[in-house]
Amino acid sequence: GFPTLLSRCTCFDTSGTFLYQYKLYFADKKTWLTIKFFF
């Protein structure tokens, strides 16, 4: 099935890197997936 977009944030990680972060949830697999895009 298609994942559910739980949250999306534009933030800085611990090292101060600017990134976009998407948090996805796959209901059928009951797994989380966090995708980060660095700039």
Image (spheres, grey):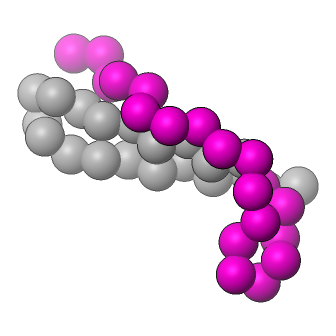
Residue 30 lies, in percent from the top left, at 13, 40
Q: Is residue 12 left or right of residue 39?
A: left
The reply, left or right, for residue 8 in relation to residue 14 is left
Left or right of 23 in this view: 22: right
Magenta run includes residue 4: yes
Vertical placement of 38 versus 21: above or below?
below
Q: Quadrant of the C terminus?
A: bottom right
On whether residue 18 falls in the magenta region, the answer is yes
Above or below: residue 16 compared with residue 27: below
Name of the residue lying farthest toward the top:
1
* Quarter of the view holding residue 38: bottom right
Q: Which residues are magenta?
A: 1-19
What's the residue at 46%, 50% (across, down)?
Answer: 34
Tell me what residue is drawn at x 11 percent, y 27 percent.
Answer: 28
Q: Position of residue 25 (x, y in %)?
A: 30, 36
Residue 3 image position (x, y, % from top left): 33, 24
Question: In the rendered picture of this protein, how many numbered marks are placed on residues?
Answer: 0
Give the position of the N terminus as an image quadrant.
Answer: top left
Vertical comparison of 32 with 26: above or below: below
Q: Residue furthest bottom?
A: 15
Residue sitting at x 38%, y 47%: 33
Which residue occupies 75% across, 47% down? 10
In the picture, residue 22 is in which quadrant?
top right
In percent of width and height, residue 4 lies at: 35, 24
